[in-house]
Amino acid sequence: MQLINDTSAQKLRGAYYTPPAIADFILRWGINGCNDADILEPSCGDGVFLKCMYDGNILYHSITAIEYEMAEAEKAKAIPLHKSNVVNSDFHRFCLDTDKHFDLIVGNPPFIRYQYYNVEQQLLADEIFKKSKLKRTKLTNAWVTFVVGSCQLLKENGKLGFVLPSELLMVKYAQQLRKFLAQTFNRINIISFKNLVFEEIQQEVVLLLCEKNGTDEHFIEHIEVRDTNELLKLNPLRLRFPTKKIDFHTDKWTYYFLEKEELDLLERVKCKNMNTISTFANVEVGITTGANDYFTVPQSVVDLYQLQEYARPMVGRSVQVNSLCFSIKDWKQNIESGAKANLLVFTSDADINGNNGVKAYLENGVKEGINKGYKTSIRNQWWVIPSIKVSDALFLRRNNLYPKFVLNEAKAYTTDTMHRVFIHPGVNKKAFVASYYNSLSFAFAEILGRNFGGGCLELMPSEVGDIYLPYREENEQIFDTLDTMLRRKATTDEILDYTDDIILRQGMGFSPEEVALARSIWLKIIKRRLSRETLEKSVKEKNI
């Protein structure tokens, strides 16, 4: 691998070695009484899986292990396993050159970003993807390539057991991989952990256990255990019968954290004449200024440089939005508090026709190098921000308890910390925004979004558009009450107790039991997400 200055060699290799308990479990699942398997470990490191096989006296036909780092390969070779072949090579090259196929492939592939690949590795990775009719992008992490390549090396009824980052379940760059796995394997089990397994990198991982059996069935199951000790108590035979049919229209596997009863309710929602946000509105990213600290300013800066001609109302942070409706009054309160509540929308001739204060501010931007930023440097005039549009509503990109959806009554601009929602003509704007505040829509937001460090939930525009929304014009009637509740900081339970009854039970005809189940789905997923935040904090405090 290419080593980058100021980055540890371990991080560049993605080398965080598997706890023996996990390796042992994957092997027990994969072997499952077989004594003549041909086994591959595509990135064996110092030989954790090989050591487990030796210590457990596991029977097999042959073992092939690949390791890129020579020093680690030598450690693996020192493990006295018969019929084993440790190859000091790049798995990419091995995958493309070998004519061998395997009954079982196990391992913990490296977590390496695209930019740490050298040119040869990038070309080899592209070839691996092409063999499976997949496309690799610059966002694709090395572990994805290892999974795709390993699938190509499996026998007709082979098994694959990997330790992978939980990103597998949700990130966009792994979307085609999820579809590929769903189509390739007949049984998929995902095992996740409530506690972090790799504390040194605070990386949440899952075990991906896949099996081909030659049938037309495609089932998946998710099992969560507390830690490696609880994992070892899990009977691998339980994994032989996943119960949930794979939904090829669902592009994220967080969906399968839920039980069958919960999944059935969500399927009924999709069939209950309930539409998604994208039916009623277009969702776009907020304005990309290229330098928020320069283009978003408090009133004091506007006054100091006499920028009033170019200053526009804006809202850019979640703390500036504490209601269902962002009004002119709310914007003025942000101005008075000293918040950066102005967006500087300079015209192309501002450097010539602007007053002395405007010219001084633009000159300061050059002195500070604002004009040399990536986004600003590719513009015809670096100070002219593109895509200046005011949206009807705002949807926060990153959120804690739940994503905020706010009517933009103040006609304020927003940066890319929020998404812009342009509501279609004929849709009642107040009813549309109010309709979002219910347990089912909150649950879909959790399912569609991505956990983004510290327990934060992030949704991109397309994901916001896919949230199911029980829109009815009658929901306008609860807008003012809901706005008041949000302003007085009512608890989420208070809000949902009120809205679920009116929106879901009375408006959509859901039974009290279905409404309660919808709430439990949301609570189940959000508690899982926020428990990671608590765990991350405790790990950081321990490290301090």
Image (cartoon, grey):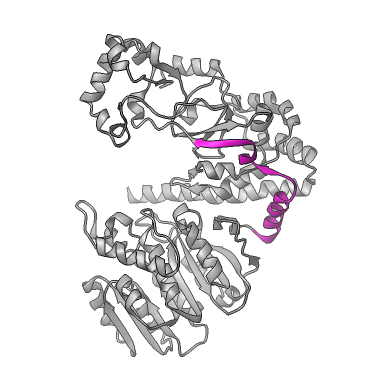
How many numbered marks, from 0 up?
Answer: 0
Q: Position of residue 149 (x, y in %)?
A: 40, 71
Viewer-proximal residue, 196 or 203? 203
User: Picture quarter containing residue 223?
Assistant: bottom right
Q: Position of residue 379 (x, y in %)?
A: 32, 31
Q: Position of residue 131 (x, y in %)?
A: 41, 70
Viewer-proximal residue, 57 or 34? 34
Q: Residue at x 48, y 50 (%)?
A: 532
Q: Quadrant of the N terminus?
A: bottom left
Q: Is residue 309 left or right of residue 469?
A: left
User: Picture quarter containing residue 66?
Assistant: bottom left
Residue 47 showing in the rendered view: no
Placement of 191 over or under 403, stated as above or below: below
Placement of 475 over or under 255, stated as above or below: above
First to last magenta residue range:
259-284
- Residue 282 is one of the magenta-drawn residues: yes
Placement of 404 over or under 42, stated as above or below: above
- Residue 11 is one of the magenta-drawn residues: no
Placement of 218 over or under 472, stated as above or below: below
Q: Position of residue 320 (x, y in %)?
A: 49, 25
Viewer-proximal residue, 329 or 175? 175
Residue 422 showing in the rendered view: yes
